[in-house]
Amino acid sequence: MILLILILLMPSGVSRELHFERMESAKLITGGRLDAAKKVLSVKNGEGIRTIPLFSIKNPPVTTRLYQIRGKVKYKDVRKASYLEMMNFFPGNRRYFTRTMAGRGPLQEIKGSSGWREFSLPFDLGPQGTMRPDSLTVSMVFFSKGAVWLKDLEFIDGDPGVRAPGTLSRPGPKPWWSPGATSIIGALWGSLFGLFGVASAVLIQKGRGKRFVLLTMVAAALLGLIATIVGVIAYYKDQPYDLYFPILLVGVLSMFLAPFIFTYAKQHYTELELRKMKAQDLASLKKHD
């Protein structure tokens, strides 16, 4: 009955309009706020990361390998890159996602402010895809304060015209933090490592600060190991590429560079100490002569 309320069955490849008023009556709208005419769904967020489920479609009439939810989106003052997400639930407790995380086009990320533009959440079951989703849930994933509006939604069974990036075969957990936070972490770590690297180079050449230099490199190697482990875990936990890759890159570089600098510094300090000892021995011999 819910499906009949939502859409009228039509031939494959033809769009089916999603009426907010009917969806509200069927209790399928789970987040956001409808305007008085029940034509526009709005959702707002304060500070911080937040996933807001907006609506669901039960037993979507999928008969082909390709389908999508399409519509128009408008947003204002979204400071950090955010996205719309369609979670596809399949039998066997399996779920797969599509996210608007591209740089442009219908799959463009949501950032800044924009007037009404088209968006698309396509899904490709693959050439051998025989499974059919039990339900679809569309959510708005915020990484900062902002407001988003949706309207003119439709479900298309058939070639959606906008391809999802292959068959999406991994479940989509909530990101640990925003891509912007990852960039900040990477930039801070890179800057600190660079500053300590320069300071260490100066101290090594002057033969000073042996304890400081060696302990700094040990700490950098350990932190690099931790960052690498976190990056690997993030990868296997299906975190976004722009979240795990910078951490993994910084971690691997630190793990290799810090031991190299440590070895070089230790050898250099040892050579300086040997030279100093030889100089003292020569001075002692001259004194006795």
Image: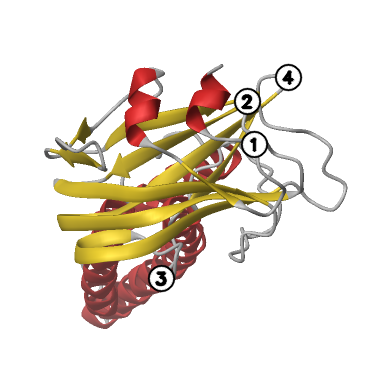
Please state the horizontal and vertical placement of residue 212, each as a whole percent of the image: 23, 56
Q: Look at discs 1 and 3 and give the one toward the viewer.
A: 1
Mark 1 / mark 4, whichever is N-terminal: 1
Foreground of the two, 2 or 169 = 2
Tell me, for residue 69, which label it has, or none. Answer: none
Foreground of the two, 276 or 57 = 57
Number of labels in the image equals 4
Q: Hey, what amino acid is under mark 4? A: Gly
Tell me, for residue 103, which label it has, or none. Answer: 3
Query: Is 43 left, or right, of 46 in this rendering?
Result: right
Question: Which residue is rendered at x = 36% and y = 60% of the image?
Answer: 109
Whether tag 1 and tag 3 are in contact, CB under 8 A, the answer is no
Whether tag 3 and tag 4 are in contact, CB under 8 A, the answer is no
Q: Hey, what amino acid is under mark 1? A: Leu
Q: Look at discs 2 and 3 and give the one toward the viewer.
A: 2
Q: Hey, what amino acid is under mark 3? A: Gly
Q: Hey, what amino acid is under mark 2? A: Asn
Foreground of the two, 237 or 282 = 237
Q: Look at discs 2 and 4 and give the one toward the viewer.
A: 2
Q: Mark 1 points at which residue?
A: 9
Determine if residue 105 is in view. Answer: yes
Whether tag 1 and tag 2 are in contact, CB under 8 A, the answer is no
- Per the model, the C-alpha gap separating discs 1 and 4 is 26 Å
Determine if residue 209 is in view. Answer: no
Mark 2 / mark 4, whichever is N-terminal: 2
Q: What element carries label 4?
A: loop
